[in-house]
Amino acid sequence: MNELLHQICSGLAAGCIYGSVALALVMIYQATHNLNFAQGEMATFSTFIAWALIHAGWPYWGAFAATVAVSFVGGLAIQRIVLRPVEKASVLANVIVFIGLAVIFNSLGGWIFDYEIKSFPSPFPQDAPYATRYFSAHELGTAGVMLAVLGALFAFFRYTPFGLAMRAAAQNPDSARLVGIRVGWMLAVGWGLAAAIGAVAGMMVAPSVFLDPNMMSGILLYAFAAALLGGIDNPFGAVLGGLIVGVLENLLGAYVVGTELKLTVALMFIVGTLTLKPNGLFGRAVVARV
Amino acid sequence: MPDLLEVRGLHAAYGSSRVLHGIDFSLAAGRITAILGANGAGKTTTLRAICQTVTTQGSVLFAGAQLVGRATESVVRLGVAHVPDGRGTFAALTVDENLRLGGYVRHDRSGVAADIEQAYRRFPRLHERRRQPAGLLSGGEQQMLAISRALMLRPRLLLLDEPSFGLAPMIVTEIFRILRALNEDEGVSILLVEQNAKLALELADRAYLLETGRVALAGSSAEIRRDEAVRRAYLGY
C-alpha cells in the first residue's frame, strides 16, 4: 500500500513537469495551430545554460532566474527571426522549421557542452523537513515550483490587460489588430513564455534524469500525450492531462510493463486519444463550415 | 471645415483580383458620409483599405497622416475605429473583456472604466450579459457590442460596415438613433457602408455611390436621393 502511494506521489511530481511542458505546447498551438517539436530541445539547451552558470560559481536561484530570463528573450527572438518569415506558410513548412530548430538546439547543446551525461543539482536538500514518506524533498519542491509557475501564468492571462490582449490575439488576430493590439509581438511573447516554462521544467527534471542533449526527448513525448489527452486547445486540460499521464505512467511502469517500456505508455495515450476521443477529455469539438 | 479623411486614387486588391480602381472621396470632420452600392461594388473593401487590412495603393490622408503603408494597429492608434463586416467580436471572451480590449491602446484607466459604464448605459442589454461570452449574444446584441467596443477607442473616425445587416427593424432603428446621437453629441465622424440606401441617406450628410470599384455618383444626401437612377435601383420607388 505504501509502495502504491509512493508511486502515485512521484507520478504526480513528474506529472507537474509533463503538464507544464504540455501547457507550453498548448500556448503556442492556440496562437498558431502548430505543435512546437523543438520545445523539448529548447528546454534542454536552457538547462545547459543553468548548468554552466552554476559551474561558474553562481548561486542556484541566481542561475535559475538568469536562465528563465535568457530563455524568455531567446524564445522571443526565435519567433521574431526564425518563425515570422514562415508565419503564412503551410503547416508542413512550419513543422520542418520546428524539426530544424530541434536538431540545431540538440547539436548546439552537444557541441558546446558535449554529450557526456552530467549531474544537475537540486535546490531542495535531501533531508529537508518537508520531505515525507511519500514525497522526496525534490519531488515536493518540483511540484511546488511548477504549481507556482502555473498559478502565475493563470493570473497573468486572467487578470492583466496584457494577458487579455494575448488571449485576444490568439483567438482572433484580425479583430485584435482592429483594437490596436500588435499581434506579431503577442506571438513572440507567447514563444518567450513557452521557452521560459520549458526552462523551469528542464531545471526541475534534470536532477532526476541527468543532463544530456537528449534529456527532454522522452518528456516531450509525455507532454504531447498530456496535451492531446487534455484537449490540445485547453490549458487546464493540458495540466490535468500531465498529472494523469504522470501517475498512470508510473503505475504501469511499476506494476505492469516495467520501467524499460514506460515510454510506450505515452505512445499508447497518444494513439488511444486520437482514435477514441480526438478532441481529448476537455477539448472543444471544432466544427468548420465548408 | 477641413477634411478629416481624404482619399485619392485608391486601388485595392485581394491577391490578383482587383476590387477598387482608383476611387476619390472625402469626409469632413464631424460629419456622416455614406458609401452605397450593390454587392461586390467594393464598399467593404473601401473600409478595409482605410484600415490597411487589404493590399492598397494610392493615398489615404487621415488628419494629415498618410495611412497607406501603415500597419493596421498603427492606423487604429491614430483614432480610426472599424466595426467590420461580420462584427468581429471575440466570441470566446466575455462582453466585459471585449469592451476592455476596445480600450486597450488607451492609458487612462479611469477613463476606460467610465466609458465601459457609459456603454452599458447606452445598451442596457449588454450590461445584463456582461459576464457571458460574446459568441452567445444575439445578432443585435453582437452589433451593439461591436459598436460599443469601437467607441472604447474614443475614435475620431468610426467606420461602420453594414450595421443593419441581418437585424430586426426595431433594433436597426435603435442603433441608427444611437449613431446619430454619437455624431451630434460627441462629434464622432462616421463613414457608413450600407446596402439599405434609404436608411443610410436619412442618417448621412453626403453619400458616394460605388459601382464595380469606381465612384459612380457623389453628392449631398438630398441630391443623391433625388437622382432618378438611384431611386429606381436602390430606393425602389
Image (cartoon, grey):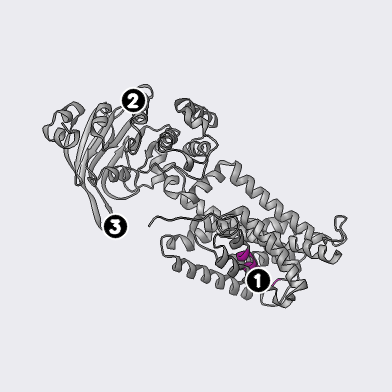
Q: Residue furthest front?
A: A276
Report the residue marked by disc 1: A218
Q: Residue furthest top?
A: B185
Residue B14 coordinates in the image, percent (x, y):
29, 54
Q: Which residue is mark 3?
A: B15
The overriding secondary structure of the stretch rendered in magenta is helix
> Which residue, given by chain and number where applicable, does mark 2 sit on?
B180
Give coordinates of residue B84: x percent, y percent: 36, 42
**Which residue type does callout 1 highlight?**
Gly
Q: Is residue B93 visible from the viewing direction of this image?
A: yes
Q: Magenta stretch: residue A222 in it?
A: yes
Residue range highlighted in magenta: A211-225
Out of A147 and A235, give the one closest to the viewer: A235
Letter of the chain that mark 2 sits on in the rendering:
B
User: Looking at the rendering, in which quadrant would you find the N terminus of chain B?
Assistant: top left
Relative depth, front residue between A135 and B82: A135
Q: Camera-side residue: A15 or A71?
A: A15
> Counting other residues with Cα less than 10 Å from the Cα at mark 3, is it few (<14), some (14-19), or many (20 or more)?
few
Image position of B107 with respect to A156: above or below: above
Label 1: chain? A
